[in-house]
Amino acid sequence: MPLSLHIKITVAPENGEKFLAALKPVFEKVVAEPECTYFEVFQNPETPGAFCLVQNWNCTKQEMIEVQRKDYYKPYVAETEAMWVKPREIEIWERMPTREWTKSKRENFM
């Protein structure tokens, strides 16, 4: 069943650009994973420095967790963990079993 991984990370506002720069190489490697079908980074306009990383996966939960443990994450975590102003929050969501709850418009990706 398709999964959606939501990772909320908050850094000090002055570290926002530095955080994104450290994330970019991981972002590129994750989207290259065959099971990753979507990855988008959101920011909270009311809380500077608050980000939500949303990844969708077409694999089992265990397979997704194995990808999250790959070596290419280590430099990113080592560089950014000290920037976090509170512990990151991780949630795993399962897609509803029918497609009636899935819609996307072309404008979403432009």
Image (tube, rainbow, N blue to C red):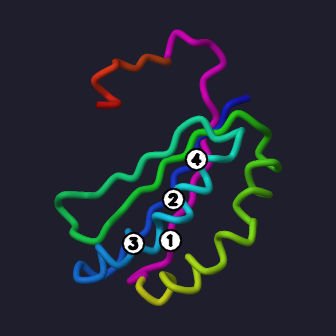
Q: CA distance from mark 1 to mark 2?
A: 7 Å
Q: Which residue is mark 4?
A: 31
**In the figure, residue 44 lies in which quadrant?**
bottom left
> Amino acid under label 4?
Val
Q: Residues within 10 Å of mark 1 (few under 14, many from 20)?
A: some
Three-letter amino acid code at the position of disc 1: Arg
In front here: 85 or 38? 38
Q: Residue at x 74, y 56 (%)?
A: 67
Q: Which is more foreground, mark 4 or mark 2?
A: 4
Secondary structure at badge 2 equals: strand
Q: Secondary structure at mark 1?
A: loop
> Which of the two discs, 4 and 2, labels the residue nearer the N terminus?
2
Residue type at mark 3?
Answer: Ala
- Of the numbered discs 4 and 3, the one sitting upstream in the chain is 3
Q: Which mark is residue 21?
A: 3
Looking at marks 3 and 1 on the same chain, the residue that comes earlier in the sequence is marked by 3
Three-letter code for the amino acid on which mark 2 is drawn: Ile
Q: Secondary structure at mark 4?
A: helix
Eyeballing the image, is 7 above or below 82? Answer: above
Where does the image place residue 36, in percent across and percent down from the top left?
Answer: 64, 41
Q: Nearer the viewer, mark 3 or mark 2?
A: 3
On the image, the x and y values in percent for residue 92 come to 62, 48
What is the count of numbered marks? 4
